[in-house]
Amino acid sequence: MRFYQNLGKLFYAIAAADGKVRVEEFAQLKKLVRDQWLVVDAIDDSFDVDATDQMEVVFDNLRATDELDATTCYDEFVHYKNKKPHLFTDEVKKLIIKTASSIAHAFAGINKAELIMLARLDIELKKA
């Protein structure tokens, strides 16, 4: 599910905005996937796994390999969003902002780099 993979990239970008991805940020993503995203999505992939789990898998793989930087991950999410705008309903946009903000606040509050990325995300999601 490319939708959830790209959300995983976005949430990694938020966590990595300050150059460090903390365990608490990943734990917050896992909590929100379980508590919020599973309610929104009931799609299972071909292996009978919740599609939302792809967010965690992508986030964790990026964290482990440190292959892509925050800006690249964010830009890839925006590119995907612009190609598939119909997937980004008002409900989904609100949940994206809530999740991104919660990740940013997960460790010692929000910092300047995270705040800037959250502001960019908010502007991007308000575009038609």
Image (tube, rainbow, N blue to C red):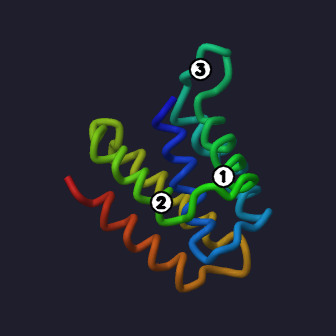
Residue depicted at x 42% and y 45%? 92
In this view, 59 is above or below 39: below
Q: Amino acid at mark 1?
A: Leu
For numbered disc 1, what is the local secondary structure?
A: helix
Query: The disc labelled 3 sits on which kind of residue?
Result: Asp
Residue bearing the label numbered 2: 72
Relative height, residue 40 to residue 103 (above, below) = above
| For residue 116, above or below residue 45 | below
Dot in front, 3 or 2: 2
Question: Which residue is disc 3 drawn over?
Answer: 44
Residue at screen point 28% across, 47% down: 82
Distance (Cα) linking label 3 and label 2: 28 Å
> Who comes first in sequence, dot 3 or dot 2?
3
- Kindly check if marks 3 and 2 are in contact, taking CB atoms under 8 A apart as contact: no
Task: Where is residue 77? Give x, y as percent.
Answer: 42, 51
Is the residue under label 1 in contact with that under label 3 (CB below 8 Å)? no
Q: CA distance from mark 1 to mark 2?
A: 11 Å
* Residue 3 image offset from top left, x and y in percent: 46, 37
Residue at x 36% of width, y 53% of height:
78
Q: Residue at x 67, y 16 (%)?
A: 48
Q: Secondary structure at mark 3?
A: loop
Q: Mark 1 or mark 2: name the one nearer the start of the chain.
A: 1
Q: Is residue 1 left or right of residue 84?
A: right
Mark seen at residue 62: 1
**In the displayed structure image, the side of residue 128 where residue 78 appears, left or right:** right
> In terms of image quadrants, where is residue 26?
bottom right
Q: Compute the Cα span from label 3 to label 1.
A: 23 Å
Q: Hey, which residue is sitting farthest left in the picture? A: 128
Q: Position of residue 62 (x, y in %)?
A: 66, 52
